[in-house]
């Protein structure tokens, strides 16, 4: 049976797809996607089984993917589960949908329920859901992001990690300890020098013109801000967009992101909108702190 795996375009999604490939074999086709990307319908038409991991699509699209073939959906994004979870259960789609763990951990538990979760998968998941409870999470993921090819089809990279090979794991960890130290120094300088305070949706917020990273969100949290707001501009669908990532350990940022057409996790979520005069989305409540003080 031919298998197509559609996965999110981040470390959690790639690890999840590598696990799917480990289970179904090297003939498994993997296709990386982000929200808004076109579905590879030609590939779907050739597949007898479609597995969607760490990702979701509108209900009509999911129904079309599932039509006439085996279909599995594994996800942990709160907004997706609220929108699609009830229908998935009603239709009996196999998979695990759970906001408390990363998709790679859920994928391993679904396909290999009687085997312990590999250490690499634990650390990728710990970062993805912004839990940061493992001391090796930062260094390991720093090394992972520095790797040239982490495609799920790169068996030479993924299989030793999924086998819990101690040499492969230690090689990345040693490399990552140096990279992580340098990255934290860079993050602290960037946040301290370029961050600016605003009130966003009623919350004291530190905003920063940069692509969001977990280390940035963690440092903003350490500085005592209820909300971190990272933003950058990029060309998207024929126009300039502002993309935002929110971080917090005090409020559910997935609810804020959903208000502006996005979603994600309680601790880290995002959204995008056509670029305007400010880095804040239309309809948002925001102000400079001094403006409120003056009033």
Image (cartoon, rainbow, N blue to C red):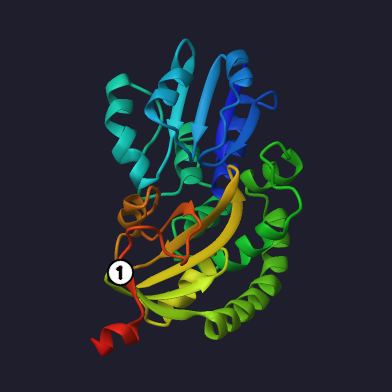
**Number of residues whose C-alpha sits closer than 10 Å to that of mark 1, classed few (under 14), some (14–19) or many (20 or more):** few
Q: Which residue is mark 1?
A: 250
- For the question of whether residue 10 can be seen, the reply is no
Pick the front one: 269 or 200: 200
- Look at the picture and state if 90 lies above or below 175: above
Quarter occupied by the C terminus? bottom left
Q: Residue at left 69%, top 23%?
A: 27
**In-image side of 291 versus 34 (left or right):** left
Q: Is residue 198 left or right of residue 295?
A: right
- Does 89 sit left or right of 152 as displayed? left
Q: How far across and down, in percent of the image, does residue 113 sit?
A: 45, 35
Q: Is residue 160 visible?
A: yes
The quadrant holding residue 255 is: bottom left
Residue furthest out toward the top: 68
Residue in the foreground of this view, choosing between 171 and 193: 193
Q: Is residue 143 above or below residue 224?
A: above
Q: Residue furthest bottom?
A: 294
**240 relative to 184, above or below:** above
Residue 24 rendering spot, x and y as whole percentages: 60, 25
Residue at left offset 64%, top offset 31%: 30
Residue ranking furthest to the left: 295
Q: Residue at x 72, y 54 (%)?
A: 168
Residue 86: image quadrant is top left
Question: Whole-percent x and y of residue 125?
Answer: 49, 53
Secondary structure under badge 1? loop
Quadrant location of the N terminus in the rendered image? top right
């Amino acid at each position: 049976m031919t298998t197509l795996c559609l996965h999110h375009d981040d470390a959690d999604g790639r690890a999840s797809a590598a696990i799917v490939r480990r289970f179904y074999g090297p003939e498994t086709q993997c296709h990386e996607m982000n929200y808004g990307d076109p579905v590879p319908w030609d590939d779907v038409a050739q597949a007898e089984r479609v597995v969607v991991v760490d990702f979701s699509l509108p209900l009509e699209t999911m129904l079309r993917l599932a039509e006439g073939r085996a279909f599995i959906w594994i996800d942990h994004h709160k907004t997706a589960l609220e929108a699609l979870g009830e229908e998935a259960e009603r239709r009996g789609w196999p998979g695990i949908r759970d906001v408390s763990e990363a998709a790679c951990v859920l994928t391993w538990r679904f396909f290999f329920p009687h085997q312990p979760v590999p250490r690499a998968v634990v650390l990728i998941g710990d970062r993805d859901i912004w839990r940061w409870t493992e001391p090796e999470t930062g260094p390991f993921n720093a090394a992972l992001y520095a790797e040239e090819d982490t495609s799920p089809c790169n068996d030479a990279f993924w299989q030793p990690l999924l086998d819990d090979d101690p040499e492969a794991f230690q090689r990345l960890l040693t490399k990552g300890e140096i990279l992580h130290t340098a990255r934290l120094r860079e993050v602290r300088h960037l946040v301290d020098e370029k961050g600016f305070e605003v009130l966003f949706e009623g919350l004291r917020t530190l905003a920063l013109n940069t692509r969001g990273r977990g280390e940035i969100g963690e440092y903003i949290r350490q500085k005592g801000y209820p909300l971190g707001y990272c933003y950058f501009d990029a060309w998207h669908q024929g126009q300039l967009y502002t993309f935002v990532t929110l971080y917090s350990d005090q409020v559910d940022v997935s609810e804020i992101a959903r208000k502006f057409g996005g979603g994600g996790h309680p601790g880290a979520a995002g959204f995008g909108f056509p670029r305007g005069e400010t880095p804040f989305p239309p309809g948002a409540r925001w102000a400079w702190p001094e403006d409120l003080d003056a009033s």
